[in-house]
C-alpha cells in the first residue's frame, strides 16, 4: 500500500514536471484553440491567409504572365494538382471565385504556416487526407505569375 | 510485500532528485550546476556548435562529421566505401566514383582529411582525403557534403603521406608508404633494393572548380614515405615528407626497418619542380590510372582512364629535393604556423626533433651535404636542427599548434598529449589520453592561423571507456579545452572506424554555403523527369527505363506492367520536391541492390534484374509525410516470353 502511495506521488511529480516542460518549450508558436470556432467572417474571399502577401490589387489579365505562370505551374505543381479535377490536392479551376488572391499566393509561398494557422487551409488539410502541400520554394514573382494563370481557369 | 527501509530510502532519494531537477528546469539549466566542465561542451537543444570537425573514418573508408564542442555526430560522408544508407556505390550515379585501374573497388582505408586553404587558412570549400590501400585521393564538396571526385595514384603502394595541401590549395600530395616496382612489374621480392622505388606525387587543384589533375611524380629511393605537411609563409613552395625503412628492408620490417639511428625528412621544392616541368625535364611514363568526377548538374559520375604520367628524376633536377636526417623513424611531420619550424615526431624515441627552415636554406646555399642518395643531397643534421623537445614521453606521433606559439604533441606509448613552447622547446603541460592516442586535431591547427580553443585526441584503444559492446569496440576521442595554461579534459565520445587525422573549422565558414536543395531547373541528368506528366516507361530490347518522379506522397508511375524476367530495369527517380529536407527513398523487393535516397531536385538510378514472375512492391524508405506509408507501388514481372504489354499508370482505378 505504501508503495502505491509513493508511486502515485512519484507520478504526480513526473507529470507536473513534464507539464512544466511543455509550457517552457515555447519555440513553436502556440497552437490556438480555434478548431471548433468558425472564422469571424463567413465569406472566404475576405480571408487573406497567413504569409508574406498582405494586399494585392489585380488589374486586367496579363497574357505574358499567364503563359509564364502556366509553365511554372506545369513544372512545379502538377505532381499534385490537376487543373480541372481533384487529385492529391484541389483543382485550381475556379479558385479565384473561392479564395482571395492573397490567400492563394500565401498558400503557395507559405504552406507550412498556412496549414498551421489559417482556418481554411487547416480544413483543407483534413479534407485532403492529411496530404501536406509541398513548399516548392517559389519566389513571390513566380507565385504571382501562377496566380495570373489561375485567373484564366474557370 | 513490505518495502524495506532501504528501498524506501532509495525511492525517497529518487523523488528528491526528481524534484530537484524539476525545480531547476527554468532559467538556469541544471547542467550548469553540475560543473564548469559540462557547461563548456553544453550546446543547448536547438543551438548549434561552434566548429565542424571532419574525422577520417579509417578502415570504414568514410569521413564522419562532428560538431564541437558537443561531440554531436552530424553526418557520415561516404567516400571510399559502399554506404547502403545513402545508396552510395549502389546507385548507377556513384558507382563510377569507385572505379580504379583494378576495376570497381568498394572499400578503402581513409586516413587524413585536409581542408582546402586560401593564404594558409582553411576556407571551407572542399575537403580532401586519401585512400591508403588502393592509392587514391577524394574531394568532398562542402556545399553538399558529398564526394565529387576520386583520382587514383599510379606507381604508389599505399597512399599514406597524403593529401596535406599547400597554402593556396595549389596541390595535394601523395607519397607512397610502401615502395613498389616503378612501374609495376613481376620481380622477386628480395630484389627490393634494385627494383623498388618510391613516388612523391603532386596533384594540382583547379582554383575555381577544385578539380584535381595529376601534375607530376618524383621518382625517389625505395623508402617508406610516411606522412607529410606542406610549408607555409616563408616555407610556402616546399612540402616535407617523413621516411622510415631507409634500410630498404622487404621483410620483418618491425625489426629490420628500425636499424638506422636516423631516417630522413624529404624536403621537396615544388616551385622548382614547376620550373623543370616548364623546361620539359619531365619524362612521360606509361601507366594507367582512373580519374572519376561527379557532375554537379548531371548528378552523375564519369570515370576516365589516363595512360601517362609525368615523372621528374632527382639526379636530373638539382635543387628539387633534399633529405634532412631525423632520428628514429619519424612519423608525423608538422610545420608551425610561421612556417619556420619543421617538427619530426620520431616515433621510436622520447624526444622530438625540430628543424629550422632558415637553417635548411642556408645549408643548401652552402652546399653543406653529408652525402647523396640517388642524386638527392643529404644535409648535415647539425646544420638544420633547431632544437629538440625533451618531453619525458615515449613514442611521439603528431603535433598541432595553437595561435599563441604553443605546440601539442601526441605520445602513443605513454598515451598523453604534451604541450610545449615553440622556440624554447620547454615542456609546459601534459594530460593523459584514454588510450594510446594517435592523431590530434586543433581547429586550424596545421594552418597559418589556428583557431585554437579545443584539442581533440583520437585514440587507438578504447577498452573500458564506454559500455562494452562485445569484443569489437569503436575508437574513442577526447576533447580538451586548451584556452588556459593547463589543458582540461571536457568530453569523451566514440568515433567511427579508426579516425586518423581530422580537421576543424569555424562553423560560419561552411554553414551559410550549405546547399538546401538541388534546383530542378538545373537538373541535367540524362534520365531526369522534372515534370510528373513526363513520367513513363520505355523499353529498348531488354533494357527498360522507368522515368519516375516522387513527391509527398506518391511515385509516378506507381503501377507498372510488362516487365519480363531477364530484363535490365533502371528506375530513374527524380525527386521533384523543392523544399529542404524532403528526400524520398526507393527500394524494390528482391533487388540485389540497396535503396536509393534522392534529395530534392536530384535524380538517382536503382538498377534491378527481375528474377521471378510475380508482382513486387516498391516503396519510399524515408518517412516523408503523414501519408508516407501510402507511398508505394507495384511492378508486375512476367515470363521472358510473355506478351503482357508495357503499361504504366498512376491513380487509375478499374471501372
Image (cartoon, coloured by chain):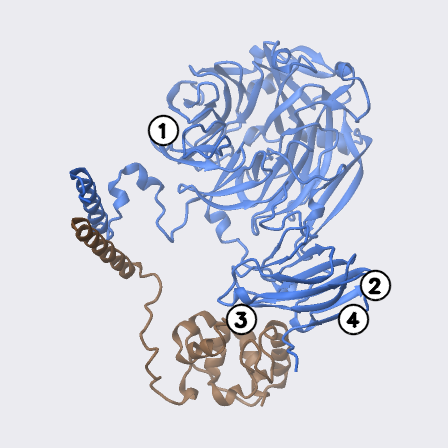
Measuring from the top left, give residue B534's x and y in whole percent.
Answer: 70, 71
Residue B345 lies, with reference to residue A136, above or below; the image says above
Chain seen in blue: B
Task: Confirm whether residue A24 shows in the render.
Answer: yes
| Residue placed under numbered mark 1 in the picture | B487
The answer to which of B350 and B111 lies nearer the viewer is: B111
Measure the alpha-carbon separation of dots 1 and 3.
Answer: 51 Å
Which is more foreground, mark 2 or mark 1? 2
Q: Secondary structure at mark 3?
A: loop
The answer to which of B593 and A22 lies nearer the viewer is: B593
In which quadrant is the C terminus of chain B drawn? bottom right
Which is more foreground, mark 4 or mark 1? 4
Which is more foreground, mark 2 or mark 4? 2
Q: Which mark is residue B589?
A: none
| Residue placed under numbered mark 2 in the picture | B641
Measure the alpha-carbon separation of dots 3 and 4.
Answer: 43 Å
Colour displayed for chain A in the image of the structure: brown
**Image-quadrant location for residue B517:** bottom right
Callout 2: chain = B
Measure the alpha-carbon separation of dots 2 and 4.
Answer: 12 Å
Q: How many neighbours does mark 1 have within 10 angstroms: few (below 14), some (14-19), or many (20 or more)?
A: many
| Residue placed under numbered mark 3 in the picture | A139
| Residue placed under numbered mark 4 in the picture | B645
Amino acid at each position: 500500500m505504501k508503495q502505491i502511495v509513493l508511486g502515485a506521488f512519484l507520478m504526480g511529480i513526473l507529470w507536473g514536471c513534464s507539464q512544466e516542460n511543455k509550457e517552457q518549450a515555447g519555440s513553436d508558436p502556440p497552437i490556438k484553440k480555434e478548431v471548433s470556432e468558425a472564422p469571424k467572417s463567413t465569406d472566404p474571399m475576405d480571408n487573406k491567409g497567413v504569409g508574406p502577401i498582405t494586399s494585392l490589387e489585380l488589374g486586367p489579365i496579363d497574357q505574358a504572365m499567364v503563359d509564364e505562370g502556366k509553365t511554372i505551374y506545369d513544372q512545379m505543381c502538377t505532381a499534385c494538382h490537376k487543373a480541372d479535377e481533384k487529385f492529391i490536392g484541389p483543382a485550381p479551376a475556379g479558385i479565384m471565385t473561392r479564395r482571395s488572391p492573397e490567400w492563394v499566393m500565401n498558400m503557395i509561398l507559405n504552406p507550412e504556416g498556412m496549414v498551421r494557422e489559417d482556418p481554411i487551409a487547416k480544413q483543407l488539410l483534413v479534407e485532403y487526407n492529411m496530404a501536406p502541400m509541398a513548399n516548392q520554394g517559389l519566389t513571390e514573382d513566380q507565385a504571382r505569375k501562377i496566380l495570373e494563370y489561375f485567373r484564366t481557369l474557370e | 510485500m513490505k518495502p524495506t527501509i532501504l528501498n524506501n530510502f532509495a525511492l525517497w532519494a529518487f523523488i528528491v532528485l526528481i524534484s530537484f531537477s524539476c525545480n531547476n528546469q527554468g532559467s538556469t539549466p541544471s547542467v550548469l550546476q553540475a560543473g564548469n566542465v559540462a557547461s563548456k561542451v553544453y550546446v543547448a537543444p536547438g543551438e548549434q556548435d561552434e566548429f565542424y570537425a571532419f574525422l577520417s573514418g579509417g578502415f570504414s573508408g568514410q569521413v564522419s562529421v562532428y560538431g564541437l564542442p558537443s561531440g554531436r555526430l552530424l553526418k557520415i560522408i561516404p567516400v571510399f566505401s559502399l554506404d547502403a544508407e545513402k545508396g552510395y556505390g549502389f546507385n548507377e550515379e556513384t558507382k563510377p566514383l569507385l572505379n580504379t585501374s583494378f576495376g570497381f573497388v568498394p572499400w578503402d582505408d581513409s586516413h587524413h582529411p585536409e581542408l582546402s586553404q586560401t593564404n594558409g587558412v582553411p576556407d571551407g570549400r572542399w575537403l580532401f582525403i586519401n585512400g591508403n590501400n588502393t592509392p587514391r585521393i577524394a574531394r568532398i564538396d562542402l556545399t553538399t557534403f558529398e564526394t565529387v571526385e576520386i583520382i587514383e595514384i599510379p606507381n604508389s603502394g599505399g597512399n599514406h603521406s597524403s593529401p596535406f595541401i599547400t597554402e593556396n590549395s595549389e596541390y595535394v600530395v601523395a607519397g607512397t608508404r610502401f615502395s613498389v616496382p616503378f612501374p609495376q612489374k613481376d620481380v622477386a621480392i628480395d630484389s627490393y633494393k634494385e627494383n623498388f622505388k618510391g613516388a612523391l606525387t603532386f596533384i594540382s587543384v583547379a582554383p575555381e572548380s577544385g578539380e584535381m589533375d595529376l601534375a607530376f611524380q618524383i621518382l625517389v629511393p625505395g623508402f617508406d614515405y610516411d606522412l607529410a605537411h606542406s610549408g607555409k609563409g616563408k616555407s610556402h613552395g616546399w612540402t616535407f615528407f617523413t621516411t622510415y625503412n631507409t634500410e630498404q628492408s622487404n621483410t620483418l620490417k618491425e625489426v629490420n626497418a628500425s636499424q638506422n639511428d636516423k631516417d630522413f625528412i624529404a624536403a621537396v621544392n615544388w616551385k622548382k619542380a614547376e620550373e623543370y616541368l616548364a623546361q620539359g625535364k619531365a619524362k612521360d611514363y606509361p601507366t594507367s590510372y582512373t580519374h572519376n568526377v561527379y557532375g554537379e548538374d548531371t548528378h552523375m559520375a564519369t570515370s576516365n582512364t589516363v595512360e601517362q604520367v609525368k615523372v621528374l628524376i632527382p639526379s636530373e633536377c638539382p635543387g628539387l629535393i633534399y633529405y634532412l636526417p631525423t632520428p628514429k623513424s619519424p612519423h608525423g611531420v608538422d610545420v608551425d604556423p610561421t612556417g619556420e619550424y619543421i617538427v619530426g615526431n620520431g616515433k621510436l624515441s622520447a624526444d622530438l626533433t625540430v628543424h629550422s627552415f632558415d637553417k635548411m636554406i642556408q645549408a643548401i646555399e652552402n652546399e653543406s651535404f653529408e652525402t647523396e642518395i640517388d642524386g638527392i643531397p643529404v644535409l648535415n643534421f647539425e646544420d638544420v636542427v633547431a632544437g629538440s623537445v625533451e618531453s619525458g614521453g615515449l613514442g611521439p606521433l603528431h603535433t598541432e599548434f595553437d595561435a599563441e606559439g604553443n605546440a601539442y604533441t601526441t605520445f602513443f606509448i605513454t598515451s598523453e598529449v604534451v604541450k610545449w613552447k615553440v622556440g624554447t622547446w620547454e615542456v609546459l603541460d601534459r594530460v593523459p589520453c584514454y588510450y594510446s592516442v594517435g592523431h590530434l586535431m586543433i581547429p586550424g591547427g596545421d594552418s597559418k592561423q589556428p583557431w585554437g580553443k579545443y584539442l581533440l585526441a583520437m585514440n587507438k584503444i578504447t577498452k573500458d571507456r564506454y559500455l562494452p559492446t562485445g569484443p569489437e569496440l569503436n575508437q574513442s576521442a577526447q576533447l580538451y579545452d586548451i584556452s588556459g595554461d593547463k589543458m582540461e579534459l571536457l568530453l569523451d565520445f566514440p568515433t567511427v572506424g579508426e579516425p586518423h587525422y581530422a580537421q576543424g573549422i569555424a562553423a560560419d565558414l561552411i554553414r551559410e554555403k550549405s546547399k538546401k536543395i538541388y534546383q530542378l531547373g538545373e537538373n541535367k541528368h540524362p534520365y531526369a523527369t522534372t515534370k510528373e506528366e513526363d513520367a513513363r516507361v520505355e523499353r529498348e530490347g531488354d533494357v527498360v527505363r522507368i522515368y519516375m518522379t516522387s513527391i509527398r506522397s506518391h511515385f509516378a508511375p506507381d503501377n507498372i506492367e510488362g516487365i519480363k524476367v531477364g530484363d535490365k530495369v533502371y528506375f530513374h527517380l527524380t525527386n521533384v520536391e523543392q523544399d529542404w529536407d524532403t528526400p524520398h527513398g526507393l527500394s524494390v523487393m528482391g533487388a540485389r541492390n540497396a535503396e536509393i535516397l534522392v534529395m530534392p531536385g536530384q535524380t538517382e538510378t536503382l538498377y534491378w534484374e527481375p528474377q521471378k514472375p510475380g508482382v513486387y512492391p516498391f516503396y519510399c524508405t524515408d518517412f516523408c509525410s503523414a501519408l508516407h506509408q501510402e507511398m508505394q507501388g507495384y511492378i508486375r514481372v512476367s515470363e521472358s516470353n510473355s506478351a503482357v504489354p508495357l503499361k504504366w499508370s498512376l491513380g487509375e482505378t478499374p471501372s
